[in-house]
Image (cartoon, grey):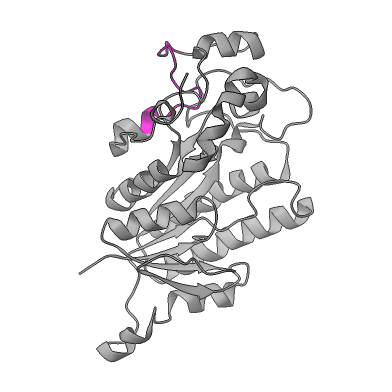
Amino acid sequence: MKKRILFTGGSGKAGRHTVPWLVNAGYEVHNVDLVPLNSPGVTNLLADVTDSGQVYNVLTMHRDFPDLDRGKGVQPFDAVVHFAAIPRILIKPDNETFRINTMSTYNVIEAAAKLGVKKIIIASSETTYGVCFAEGHRDFHHFPLEEDYDVNPMDSYGLSKVVNEKTARAFAERFGIDIYALRIGNVIEPHEYERFPEYFADSEIRKRIAWSYIDARDLGQIVHLCIEKSGLGFEVFNAANDTVSANTPSRELAAKHFPNVPFMREIGEYEGLLSNRKIREVLGFKEEHNWRRYVEV
């Protein structure tokens, strides 16, 4: 029987590529969003995940009419993937960004855990490292950025993601389940590689994100790997591709823009400063969409 996946925010930038990946991998995917995702094999339910009652109903309803014909009641979900969020600052007032992102995550995790779901994956963010939406220039503590970093954002969005990681850890401890938080780098859709020459010409553009990126399709692979990897309890993973989104070596970029930031270990010539070493070693991630496949240099 196919695994049943509840996916919140599947109609967003990351979700609309991740969800088809999961469908192609053989999962039944039910998308929960404020707008539907028009993708083959995906069912949709329109719901506000900041409302705990709606979230509980989402998890205890049939997916589609054929479920009624089985006559076996509502089938439980095998995993929940929570991507729904306000995606950055400056879209809604700061307090609304914080409220929506933290309460939706609490609601989804609480309902899923109390209903017996054993695997939950949430979208955290590279912004937790504290520079992306900082006031003025701010140095990172060190390079590369790895999951044991002392995260300290000063903005409502990054702070909401730190809180969400703490929420996830608390529920994983209480219920003895797997909850994995993905610190997702700048998501790049296939058509967006056309902008990379602009980024190469001006490395200042992407310094706040340490020149990180994650191909939206490779993000699908990461979520798939998370669903299949069990027994880790609470974990945080950087979700990024192998290299920086620049044709300049990584240490050269760091020396130019962050000259006072030390390196904690040796890195490869173009190795990503938002390190994906953990997902490669723990989950077996192998990128399929390095930018060099799509951009001439």
Q: Nearer the viewer, residue 23 or 284?
A: 23
Query: Where residue 48 appears, x then y in whole percent?
Result: 61, 71
Q: Nearer the viewer, residue 44 or 200?
A: 200
Q: Nearer the viewer, residue 84 or 95?
A: 84
Task: Name the quadrant containing residue 192.
Answer: top right
Please, is residue 251 above or below residue 105 in the view? above
Determine whether, in the image, residue 136 is placed left or right of residue 24.
right
Residue drawn where x is 37% and y is 44% of the image: 222
Q: Is residue 89 visible?
A: yes
Query: Where residue 296 appears, x then y in whole percent?
Result: 45, 23
Q: Quadrant of the N terminus?
A: bottom left
Residue furthest out toward the left: 1
For the stretch drawn in magenta, what is the main secondary structure? loop
Please, is residue 125 above or below residue 73 in the view? above
Residue 274 sits inside the magenta stretch: yes
Residue drawn where x is 40% and y is 27% of the image: 242
Q: Which residues make up the magenta segment?
A: 265-278
Task: Name the quadrant containing residue 53.
Answer: bottom right
Determine whether, in the image, residue 2 is placed left or right of residue 144.
left
Q: Looking at the image, how many numbered discs can be counted on the residues?
A: 0
Residue drawn where x is 58% and y is 29% of the image: 150
Query: Where residue 208 appears, x then y in whole percent?
Result: 65, 27
Please, is residue 246 above or below residue 131 in the view? above
Residue 191 sits inside the magenta stretch: no
Determine whether, in the image, residue 139 is placed left or right of residue 84.
right
Q: Is residue 71 visible?
A: no
